[in-house]
Amino acid sequence: MKKVYLVLSNGKIFEGESFGYEKEVFGELVFTTSMTGYIETLSDPGFCGQIVVSTFPLIGNYGAMEEDMQSAIPSLKALVVRHMCEQPSNFRATGTLDTFMKKYGIVGISGIDTRELTSIIREHGSQVAFICESVTDQIIELAKNYKIIEACKEVGTKEIKTFSSEGCSKYNVTVIDYGVQKNLIDNLIHLGCNVSLVPRYTTAEDIISTNPDGIILSGGPGNPQNHTESIEIIKALIGKKPILGVCLGHQLLALAMGAQTFKMKCGHRGENQPVIQPGTCRTYITSQNHGYAVDAGSLPPFAKVLYENANDGTCEGIEYPKHCAFSVQFRPQASDASGGSSPVFDHFIKMIGGEI
């Protein structure tokens, strides 16, 4: 394998070996604590523009399965791992992780001390990094001064798409696409919903004119405060139809309601994030991918915090009872649509059915 370097904006340099697609890339360096699901990570629109460090040391051991992809075109910049398995064992695998990343233009670097790298991110926060074949003073200076370009316009559908429910149709749900994951749509159609996926810039008037039973604000990448057009659209939708916000949609709904968001030091990324319901002993282990959070102290008086992160106490869910709307920072969808529905989807279905 070819020798390559990971250059951080703080001047730290790591030497590793190239795999996947070969090119030099800039990106925001973040880490994920997921032990599995690397194909879902690589194809998650929420990682658009980012270089992702896997804290789990062995990646690629079960190969690549394109049917597990969460978007048609991966938008992640690069993957950083300790060890990359070159000989996977899995009856579902259609190829190796290396060939998958070459096909979709994703850069990989292995042989990195990911424990040290994760510690740097935890201590100093996410930062810009550069993967290159040689290190010069100019490269280090570029890494220090490079600005992350907002990714919100790079993902999401550009045209309306429809998906029919499995079996008997119960409801029509419109999903506004800021970077939706395929699993969310799969779960909705499994629950008997016909789904219309619309671009993020679709006007409130056009959405309401199709008379949906409910509206979902999807997840996606970037700083929620930069989605000014989307926030205004959501303001016009509030109170018109039942609304569920998911991940980025959770943050956008809060901003539309008058709350504030803030950038976290290193965010929550992984499939093992603990979430609790205040006042109860119930804990959920959730999948998350976000670097921003809603400031619970800025919520309007009519809002109620539904969930909190068990590690740092940040807001993970909000209900707006008088507006027939609620949101969660985590992903309510299962990895597939066969394992039953989540409490979040159950609540949403009851809401659009008039039971709540």
Image: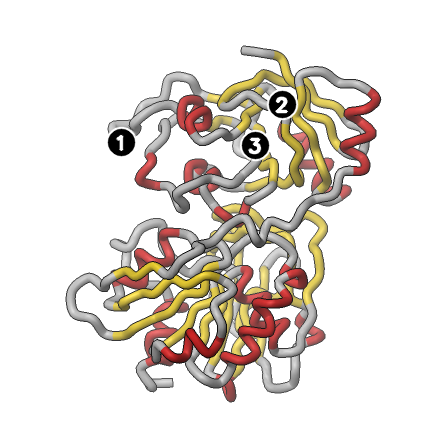
Tell me the SS state at disc 1. Answer: loop
The answer to whether residue 224 is left or right of residue 289 is right
Badge 3 crowding class, 10 Å Cα cut-off, few under 14, some 14 to 19, many 20 or more, is many
* Residue situated furthest left in the rendering: 167
Mark 1 or mark 3, earlier in chain = 3
Q: Say which residue label 3 marks.
A: 78
Mark 2 or mark 3, earlier in chain = 3
Q: Camera-side residue: 224 or 316?
A: 224
Q: CA distance from mark 2 to mark 3?
A: 13 Å
As shown in the figure, which amino acid type bears the numbered disc 3?
Ala
Tell me what residue is drawn at x 81 percent, y 38 percent.
145
Q: Which mark is residue 353?
A: none
**Residue 284 shows in this picture:** no
* Residue situated furthest bottom in the rendering: 322
Quadrant of the image containing the C terminus: bottom left
Tell me what residue is drawn at x 58 percent, y 29 percent.
80
Mark 1 or mark 2, earlier in chain = 1
**Looking at the picture, how far across and down is residue 294, in whole percent?**
64, 66
Tell me the SS state at disc 2. Answer: loop
Tell me what residue is drawn at x 42 percent, y 37 percent.
39
Q: Which mark is residue 112?
A: 2
